Each structure stands twice: as C-alpha cells, then as structure tokens.
C-alpha cells in the first residue's frame, strides 16, 4: 500500500479525514432486510445493537428503516419514520459516533437530521426524491450518493453495461458535479458504486477489482458488500455464513484504499483492519 487511505468522519458538520479505513456499522430497523431482517426491528433492540457496534469500533452507524434488497416492497413515509427516528434519537443520546440515515425519502432524511443524524445515505444518488438535494443543502448534512440501475423492484431483472466500471465512474463524477452545483460542499460528499444494485455477479466482481479507480472522483468512496449474494456465489453455497467472505473482500478494499467499508459484522472487521493496517505502516508500534 503506497499511501494511507483516508476515513470519512463528521466534525462540526463537515467531513474530515484521518488515517485508515472507517467501518460503517449497519443498523437495520426492518423486518425484511436480506441478512438480518427482523433481528432488530424494535427500537430498543436496534439501539442496543448500534451501541454494541460503536463499542466494537464502528466509526459511523447507518440506520435504515426500509429494505432495499432485490424485489423488496416500498415502505410508507410514516412507517419508515416510526422505525428510524426513535433509534436515531436513542443512539445520539448515548453515543458520540456520527449517525447516518439510509433513506431515499426527503421527509425521512429531514426528520432524521432533526433527530441528530448527520449524514444522508441515499441509494438513489439523491435522485429518487426531488426534495432530497434541498434537504441536504439546507441542513448542511453530509451525503453519500450511490449508483443503482433501476429500483429494488426491477434492478436485478436484467442489468446491462458495456463497461460497468467506466459507466459507474462517469455517473459518480457527474453526480458529484451536480451536487456541488446545487450547493453541497465537495468535502461533504461521499460516493458509492452500489455493489448489488442493478449488477450481475460478474459486474460486482469487476467493481471490487476496479474499486481503486473510483478515487478519480476526488471523493471518499463507500462500498457496501457485506453478506451480499455475490459472496455466497463465490463461496459456492448460498446458505453458508458469509462473514468470512465479507471480511476477505473488506481486506481487499482496504488495500485499494477505499475509505468507508459498510458491514454487518463490525468487531472482526475492525480487528482485521487494525492488524492489516499496522503491517502496512512501518512506523506502527505494537498496540498502537
């Protein structure tokens, strides 16, 4: 590794950087998410889960109240609010870890930011709701804009690209330019190529291989590969536990200097990254 990667952190409403990749912990407050749906569907269990992830070393907690797995059903605004707002309020009251809201609805994002969240993580690239960009501008929130081909209801039907990496890179660069022109500060923008969102198995593998190309955007890059179907396919068993496979991809992404790694299993990821990062820095002292 030729230079340290940077991490994406919130301080005084702006995105700042420090050495090493950051781990974003997933807090799904849903009954139907593909991996852990229903495990933390009530506010109390979701808050405890988020606190546990923070203690394990999560640098950001990403709270979502609507599943975006393939063929998932949309959730009404009121239902999504009922799911995420108590959890965000509970986490903000107990932790000093930045909270992200995983939503494509402007009303949910605004309520979440009012409740203490600092980041909007939008799988539609802030395109799904015409009011989302205004919310981000008016609140000064950090944003993560993701690429997706289609919607969760259609994205895996027949995704096609001539050059998947180049096309997504072009989209992310254009999206950054649009968001900056709309009034969002460049240092508040993070970008995500959208592993699994309108991509085949081979598309996902190609995006992992080419992950470092997305640094051309000039923004921190977030990749959410945790427990996804392409990992099960690589392991040769869709029913097999995917945490070890996820960790292997995480280490590769760290070597490619991806700044934010979004995962379900935080403790093993943080431990592995700490040891791998120490080995990549000659000056690292034991226990540092």
Image (cartoon, rainbow, N blue to C red):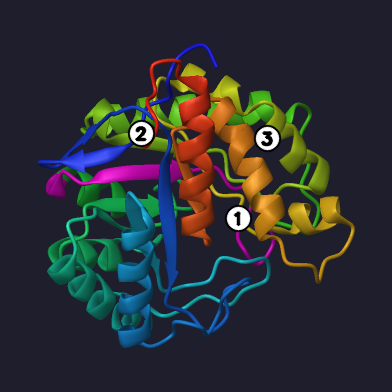
Residue 89 is situated, as x and y percent measured from the top left of the image, at: 18, 73
Horizontal side of residue 109 vs 103, given as left or right:
left
Q: Secondary structure at mark 2?
A: loop
Q: Earlier in the sequence, mark 2 or mark 3?
A: 2
- Residues shaded magenta: 138-154
In the rendered image, which quarter is residue 108 located in? bottom left
Horizontal side of residue 100 vs 93, given as left or right:
right
**Which residue position is annotated with label 1?**
226
Q: Looking at this view, name the residue that lies furthest to the top.
A: 2
Q: Secondary structure at mark 1?
A: loop
**Which residue position is annotated with label 3?**
208
Count the marks: how many?
A: 3
Q: Measured along the vertical axis of the image, is residue 259 above or below residue 46?
A: above
| Quadrant in which the N terminus is drawn | top right
Q: Nearest the camera: 249 or 124?
A: 249
Q: Earlier in the sequence, mark 1 or mark 2?
A: 2
The circle on residue 38 is: none
Q: Secondary structure at mark 3?
A: helix
| Mark 2–mark 3 CB contact (< 8 Å) | no
Residue 180 is situated, as x and y percent measured from the top left of the image, at: 28, 28
The circle on residue 7 is: 2
């Amino acid at each position: 590794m030729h230079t340290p990667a940077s991490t994406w952190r919130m301080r005084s409403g702006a995105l700042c950087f420090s050495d090493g990749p950051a781990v974003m912990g997933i807090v799904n407050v849903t009954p139907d998410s593909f991996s852990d749906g229903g495990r933390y569907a009530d506010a109390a269990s979701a808050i405890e889960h988020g606190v546990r992830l923070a203690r394990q070393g999560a640098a950001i907690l990403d709270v979502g109240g609507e599943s975006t797995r393939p063929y998932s059903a949309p959730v009404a605004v009121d239902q999504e609010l009922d799911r995420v707002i108590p959890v965000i309020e509970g986490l903000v009251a107990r932790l000093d870890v930045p909270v992200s809201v995983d939503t494509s609805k402007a009303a949910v994002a605004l309520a979440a930011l009012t409740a203490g969240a600092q980041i909007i993580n939008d799988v539609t690239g802030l395109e799904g709701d015409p009011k989302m960009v205004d919310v981000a501008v008016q609140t000064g929130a950090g944003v993560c804009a993701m690429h997706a081909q289609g919607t969760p209801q259609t994205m895996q039907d027949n995704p096609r690209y001539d050059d998947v990496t180049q096309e997504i890179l072009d989209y992310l660069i254009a999206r950054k330019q649009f968001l900056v022109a709309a009034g969002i500060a460049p240092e508040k923008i993070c970008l995500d190529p959208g592993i699994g969102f309108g991509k085949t198995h081979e598309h996902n593998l190609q995006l992992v291989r080419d992950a470092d190309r997305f640094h051309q955007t000039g923004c921190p890059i977030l990749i959410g590969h945790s427990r996804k179907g392409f990992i099960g396919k690589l392991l040769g068993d869709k029913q097999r536990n995917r945490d070890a496979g996820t960790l292997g991809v995480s280490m590769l992404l760290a070597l490619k200097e991806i700044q934010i790694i979004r995962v379900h299993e935080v403790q093993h990821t943080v431990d592995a990254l700490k040891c791998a990062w120490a080995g990549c820095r000659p000056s690292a002292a034991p226990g540092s």
